[in-house]
Structure formats: structure tokens, C-alpha cells
Image: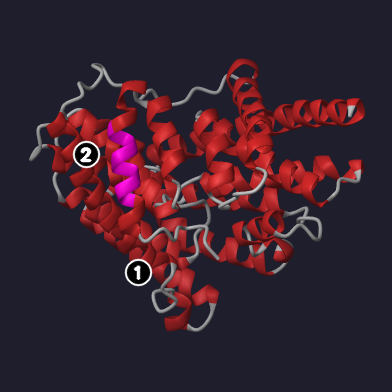
């Protein structure tokens, strides 16, 4: 027992340091890439070529990492073989390429694969058993998510919830939390990572009407999440590959479509992470078409094969939708936006608990009752089958 405790202290400490440093490097580089794109909007026209480059990368030198998040999930659910060594560097590099060209993608795929990949590398010399390796991979996922998004408590819950882990959660949760807190603190205090400030200016007041409106908004968030899952994630007919024959043709053609829509439609605010839209959504009601446009552009980029993730665009879609709908409720716009931020994510990811905890971390602990209702309703309406389902 003492040796086991010492081993896990060493693993958690090492994982926090390695993932915290790696996540900080990614966050700082991504911030630089996003600033570069904002300063040089013409980089948008490089997106189709960048898409060809990342497609070639995954078809040749990083072919073993082509499965991406699916590969990581498969090893967490049934640990059998080491993760590809190229998993973390490939997703980091291609995510940066996607954002260099202004693609409407996220960064959670990078956070999860980077954390899981680094955890697997760290654990190889220890000769871990199946259950210990599963635990270490989950700790890596927690550390990556927590350090990239700055939400370590939500990250620990997310790591266990997104794989639908029912057995053994009681001892894995503290280890996941320890690693996510450690990686987040390493990123903040050692490497100077600064995350967005989404805290509510005034805490929400609890009223019966507010709970009813939270449920109603949850219904809308769930419908959006369900539409995204139905038409983007789980619909093979949407994938451009089925229309254009090869991944190269698909990513190039849909990259051109995206460039045309953004450039000629004046949609520069919708490129990349678009977190400014989420910030603005908390200040004043958004036009109902704003979340629709972000949804469409994200669907094009994800369907085409641009790498990075889907969660941050879903945050923005939800925040803008909640802001637009809050104007028809008794809830403040900031509260509606906050509920949408976590509600669409909870429904699309099938992670209502993580969404609720994230609402407390990002916005205000007093938002928890409203967030719990909105996230639970969204999850039920979306169908309880999330982005990470097999």
C-alpha cells in the first residue's frame, strides 16, 4: 500500500507538471495564432491549403494518430495497447493550423488528446496494470481539460462523465481532481496562463419563474444540441467525403466554401473560437441569427475535417442563443447567456454534471440550481447520446 501511494503521488505530480507545461505552451501559442489571424485577415484564404496539409499529415507521418479522440476513448474504455506517440503533437499542430486559417473549430479535442497522450507516455515506464492505466489516462484527460479551459473541478467530473464511467469513479475522482488542479495551477502560476473572465456582475436571484424559464431554455439548448449531433456528428451523409470522394477534395472544397461565406458575408467575427461573441452575449441580447450562423460555419469546418474540437464553438452558440432567448424571459441576459454557454455543451456532450460544475466555476456558484435544471433538460432532450458516444 505505501508503495502504491508513493507511485501515485509521483505520477500525479509528474502529470500535473508535464500537462500543465504542455497546455500552457499550447494556450500561449494559440493566443498568438489567433492574434496573428486578427491582424492579417487575408490568412483566411490559406485555409483550404492548410486543410490539405493537415490531411496529408494524418495520412502519412501521423497516420497512427488519425483516429484522434476515438483512439483515446477506445484505450480508456478497453486499455490494450499504447497510444500513438504522435497523438499529442499531431492534434496540437493541426489545431494551430486550423486557427491560423480562421476555421470555426475549438480546442477541447486538443486538450483531451494532449493530456491523454502525455499521461500514456509518462506511465509507460511504470508497468501499470489495466485499471491503473485507465485511471492515469482519465487523470491526463482531466489535467488537459482543466489546464486549457481553466475549470479544474468541471474537468475532473467531465473525465469520468464523458466515458460514462460508473464503476470505480469514487476513487478516480480525487485523483482526476488532483491532477486537473495541479495542471491548472502550473499553467497559471508558473507559465502565466490567463483565462477569460466570465463571472456574473450580480449573482442571480432564485425565483420559481426563474426555475421554469431555466427549464424552458434547457429545452431550446437540448434541441440545438440534438440537431448538431443528428446533422453533424452522427450523420455520415453530411460528411463531405461522401460527396467528394477523397479527404483532400472534401477539405479543400469545403474550405473554399467557408472562405467564401466568411469573406463575402462579412462574418469575420464568427471565425476561430469567437469568444468575443460569448462575451458580448452576456452584455446585451444577441440577434437570433447569430447562433445560427456560428452553427453553420462550425458544421462546415468540423464536417470537412478541420481539427481542434467542437466544444468551444458550442459554448459560443449556446451563449448567443441563451442571450437571444433571455430577452423573452424574466431572466437577465447575462444569466441566459451563461445557461446557454453550459447548456448546449451539456446536451451535446452528454455531460450534465460537468456542465453544472462549469457554470459554478466560470460564472457564479449561485447559478448552480438554474444550471442544473437547464443542463439536465438539455441532456434529456438531446437524447443522452453525446459527442463522445461510440
Mark 2–mark 1 Cα distance, whole angstroms, equals 25 Å
Residue 268, image x and y in percent?
29, 47
Q: Would you say residue 366 sits in the magenta stretch? A: no
Quadrant including the C terminus: bottom right
- In the rendered structure, the answer to whether residue 359 lies left or right of residue 162 reads left
Colour logic? secondary structure
Residue 122: horizontal and vertical position, in percent? 81, 40
The residue at 53%/46% (across/down) is: 161
User: Which label belongs to residue 214?
Assistant: 2
Front position in the image: 324 or 222: 222
As displayed, is residue 223 above or below residue 208? below
Tell us which disc is closer to us: 2 or 1: 2
Residue at the image position 55 percent from the left and 29 percent from the top: 152
Q: Compared with residue 223, is residue 331 higher up or lower down, i.e. above or below?
A: above
Residue 262 in view here: no
Towards the viewer: 387 or 239: 387
Give the labeled residue for mark 1.
231
Amino acid at each position: 500500500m505505501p508503495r502504491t501511494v508513493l507511485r501515485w503521488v509521483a505520477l500525479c505530480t509528474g502529470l500535473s507538471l508535464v500537462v500543465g507545461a504542455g497546455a500552457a505552451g499550447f494556450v500561449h501559442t494559440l493566443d498568438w495564432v489567433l492574434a496573428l489571424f486578427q491582424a492579417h485577415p487575408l490568412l483566411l484564404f490559406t485555409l483550404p491549403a492548410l486543410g490539405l496539409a493537415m490531411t496529408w499529415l494524418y495520412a502519412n507521418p501521423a497516420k497512427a494518430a488519425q483516429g484522434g479522440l476515438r483512439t483515446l476513448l477506445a484505450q480508456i474504455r478497453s486499455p490494450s495497447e499504447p497510444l500513438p506517440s504522435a497523438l499529442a503533437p499531431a492534434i496540437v499542430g493541426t489545431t494551430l493550423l486550423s486557427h491560423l486559417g480562421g476555421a470555426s473549430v475549438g480546442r477541447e479535442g486538443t486538450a483531451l488528446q494532449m493530456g491523454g497522450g502525455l499521461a500514456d507516455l509518462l506511465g509507460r515506464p511504470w508497468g501499470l496494470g489495466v485499471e491503473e492505466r485507465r485511471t492515469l489516462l482519465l487523470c491526463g484527460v482531466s489535467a488537459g481539460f482543466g489546464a486549457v479551459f481553466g475549470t479544474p473541478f468541471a474537468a475532473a467530473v467531465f473525465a469520468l462523465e464523458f466515458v460514462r464511467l460508473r464503476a470505480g469513479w469514487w476513487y478516480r475522482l480525487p485523483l482526476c481532481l488532483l491532477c486537473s488542479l495541479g495542471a491548472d495551477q502550473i499553467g497559471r502560476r508558473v507559465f502565466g496562463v490567463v483565462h477569460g473572465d466570465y463571472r456574473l456582475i450580480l449573482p442571480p436571484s432564485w425565483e420559481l419563474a426563474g426555475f421554469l424559464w431555466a427549464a424552458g431554455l434547457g429545452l431550446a439548448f437540448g434541441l440545438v444540441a440534438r440537431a448538431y449531433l443528428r446533422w453533424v456528428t452522427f450523420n455520415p451523409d453530411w460528411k463531405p467525403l461522401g460527396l467528394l470522394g477523397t479527404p483532400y477534395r472534401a477539405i479543400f472544397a469545403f474550405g473554399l466554401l467557408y472562405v467564401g461565406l466568411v469573406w463575402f458575408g462579412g462574418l469575420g467575427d464568427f471565425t476561430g473560437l469567437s469568444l468575443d461573441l460569448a462575451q458580448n452575449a452576456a452584455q446585451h441580447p444577441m440577434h437570433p441569427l447569430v447562433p445560427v450562423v456560428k452553427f453553420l460555419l462550425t458544421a462546415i469546418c468540423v464536417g470537412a475535417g478541420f481539427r481542434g474540437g467542437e466544444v468551444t464553438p458550442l459554448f459560443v452558440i449556446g451563449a448567443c442563443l441563451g442571450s437571444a432567448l433571455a430577452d423573452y424571459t424574466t431572466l437577465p441576459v447575462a444569466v441566459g447567456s451563461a445557461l446557454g454557454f453550459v447548456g448546449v455543451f451539456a446536451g451535446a456532450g452528454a455531460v450534465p454534471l460537468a456542465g453544472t460544475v462549469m457554470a459554478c466555476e466560470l460564472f457564479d456558484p449561485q447559478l448552480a440550481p438554474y444550471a442544473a435544471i437547464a443542463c439536465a433538460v438539455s441532456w434529456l432532450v438531446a437524447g443522452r447520446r453525446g459527442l463522445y458516444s461510440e
